[in-house]
Image (cartoon, rainbow, N blue to C red):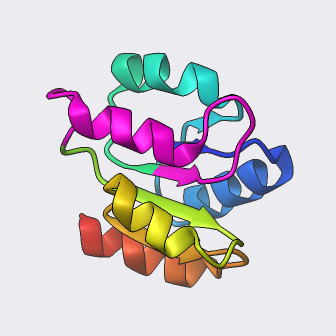
Amino acid sequence: MICDDDEGILDITGLLLESYGYQVLLEPNSTLLLPRIALEKPDLLLIDIWMPQMMGDEIVRILRRNQETSHLPVIMFSASRESKRIASEAGANDYIAKPFSIEDLNDKIMALG
């Protein structure tokens, strides 16, 4: 599952990951993400840190406190300098800086699988 408020990034990342054989779920609205995760039970979450309404790090902290989602692998991404630290402090499994190559992202996904 991918969550990013930038629908262009969301769409292209989704298409590229599908070309690698992944089944991809897209969510542009961070406030709808937690109920979708509960319903869809994804194998991995790729989430932007900087989003309106609910920030990505806030969502990851909520996931980590919930017994049903505490072990969900999470890769956070952003273009901000402090984002790697934020991702680590929130409990993300990994971080990738924007812009990223789809090959690097796939390597990170495979490492978590």
The residue sitting at 49% across, 48% down in the picture is 57
Q: Residue 64 location, x and y as percent?
A: 26, 40
Placement of 34 over or under 96, stated as above or below: above
The residue sitting at 55% across, 50% down in the picture is 47
The residue sitting at 26% across, 67% down in the picture is 112
Q: Residue 81 location, x and y as percent?
A: 65, 79
Q: Quadrant of residue 17?
A: bottom right
Question: How many marks overall?
Answer: 0
65 part of magenta stretch: yes
Q: Quadrant of residue 19?
A: bottom right
Residue 69 visible from this viewpoint? no
Residue in the foreground of this view, choosing between 86 and 4: 86
Residue in the foreground of this view, choosing between 53 and 108: 53
109 left or right, relative to 65: right
Placement of 96 over or under 77, stated as above or below: below
The residue sitting at 85% across, 52% down in the picture is 8
Q: Residue 37 location, x and y as percent?
A: 41, 27
- Quadrant the C terminus occupies: bottom left
Residue in the foreground of this view, choosing between 96 and 15: 96
Q: Residue 11 location, x and y as percent?
A: 76, 49
53 left or right, relative to 77: right
Q: What stretch is highlighted in magenta?
A: 46-70
Residue in the foreground of this view, choosing between 54 and 5: 54
Residue 37 visible from this viewpoint? yes
7 left or right, relative to 22: right
